[in-house]
Amino acid sequence: MADRTPYTAVTRNIAVSVVPTYLEANSSPANAQYVWAYRVTIENRGNETVQLRSRHWMITNARGEFTEVKGPGVVGEQPVLRPGESFQYTSGAPLNTPSGMMGGAYLMESESGEQFHIEIPTFSLDSPGQNVMLH
């Protein structure tokens, strides 16, 4: 996953970068099962310590069918990021079409208790051999 250019968004000096990878070994096109892994890096480029509280993903398949995923933290964690620190994790997403897209937001909280959303950039999920790029 390291050799691809990440999709990146910066909100309030917090950068979110995502690199998706199609998992051919976990996919079964004959059964309409397509699986991707995605690596997310969250980097605090600001001057205040923040904590990731929750996630809100919006996932759309190639037919325009929409799924929302909401919940506390990411991969069971609610990381605290001091200025200059970053947090990285890998997760996965299945689709029933050979392409789609994902994006969303994280709810963050500053040391003073202020809560705010940061953008997760919308990124394309494209299996090999697909001629259409959604993003």
Image: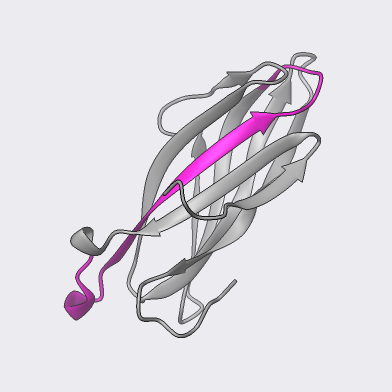
The percent coordinates of residue 112 (x first, y second) are 80, 14
State the quadrant of the C terminus: bottom right
In this orientation, which residue lies closer to the viewer: 97 or 42? Answer: 42
Residue 31's place in the image compared with 73, above or below, is below
The percent coordinates of residue 60 (x first, y second) are 50, 69
Q: Residue furthest front?
A: 3
Q: Residue at the spot x=51%, y=78% of the render?
A: 64
Q: Residue at the spot x=75%, y=14% of the render?
A: 111
Residue 35 left/right relative to 103: left
Q: Quadrant of residue 17?
A: top right
The percent coordinates of residue 101 (x first, y second) are 52, 66
Residue 72 left/right relative to 53: left
Residue 99's place in the image compared with 59, above or below, is below
- Numbered-mark total: 0
Q: Is residue 134 visible?
A: yes
Q: Is residue 73 visible?
A: no
Residue 80 left/right relative to 4: right
Is 109 included in the stretch rendered in magenta?
no
In this orientation, which residue lies closer to the viewer: 54 or 126? Answer: 126
Q: Residue at the spot x=60%, y=26% of the render?
A: 86
The percent coordinates of residue 106 (x first, y second) are 63, 40
Magenta highlight range:
27-50
Q: Quadrant of residue 96?
A: bottom left
Q: Residue at the spot x=54%, y=49% of the render?
A: 18
Residue 26's place in the image compared with 131, above or below, is above
Is 28 included in the stretch rendered in magenta?
yes
How was this image coloured?
one colour
